[in-house]
Amino acid sequence: MYGFAEFKSILQQLPGRVQQNVCRTAVFRAAQKVRDDAKNLLQANGNVRSDEKLLDSIKARRARNKLNQETGEMEAAAKIYSKVRYAHLIELGHTVHTTSGKWAEKGISHVPASPFLVPALEAARPYLLELIKQNLKFELEKAWSKHGLGRIPEPQLDEEE
């Protein structure tokens, strides 16, 4: 069984740029799963009409690798977002202030939240690390064979484990 320590030792045998790409892609693939779950939640939510523009705007993107100042190691991240200007209003809910009585009664009304991004992430939390591990193994094997290194080496376990 591979753990993150074993993956790290195998990763360090690859060129630096390849290491970064392998990690970024593994995390990105996990983010794509969360993005798909968010889209499914939005479609399944009875309070919100299936807004094609909103559904199409939910994206997963590789984030730039950042150097952790404390450990000196690179960190891989991904972003899940929507650029539709009203997505946050659906996710968090909002109030509507009306001043004219043409189509609605004057006053303040509350539009309840219909969250889709946060619940998708919360639902994925229990298996997210395992999903990243699976993606990391797949990407490592792909990079390993691409660089002509043969099969990925078996992890070396310490005597204490």
Image (cartoon, rainbow, N blue to C red):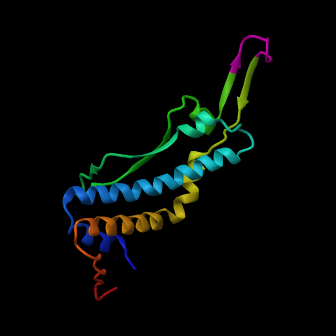
Position of 48 with respect to 154 (left or right) is right
- Residue pictured at 26% horizontal, 67% vertical: 11
Which quadrant is the C terminus positioned in?
bottom left
Between 161 and 37, the one nearer to me in the picture: 37
Position of 59 with respect to 87 (left or right) is left
- Residue pictured at 25% horizontal, 72% vertical: 9
- Residue pictured at 56% horizontal, 51% vertical: 36
Q: Is residue 5 placed above or below 95 in the rendered structure? A: below
Residue 99 sits inside the magenta stretch: yes
**Dominant secondary structure of the residues highlighted in magenta in the image:** loop
Question: What is the quadrant of residue 155 in the picture?
Answer: bottom left
Between 119 and 53, the one nearer to me in the picture: 53
The image shows residue 76 at horizontal and vertical percentages of: 34, 54
The image shows residue 99 at horizontal and vertical percentages of: 72, 12
Which quadrant is the N terminus positioned in?
bottom left
- Residue pictured at 24% horizontal, 51% vertical: 69
Figure label count: 0
Position of 117 with respect to 29 (left or right) is right
Residue 69 sits inside the magenta stretch: no
Q: Is residue 37 placed above or below 94 in the rendered structure? A: below
Which contiguous range is marked in magenta?
A: 97-106
The image shows residue 104 at horizontal and vertical percentages of: 79, 18
The image shows residue 92 at horizontal and vertical percentages of: 61, 37
Q: Is residue 7 placed above or below 77 in the rendered structure? A: below
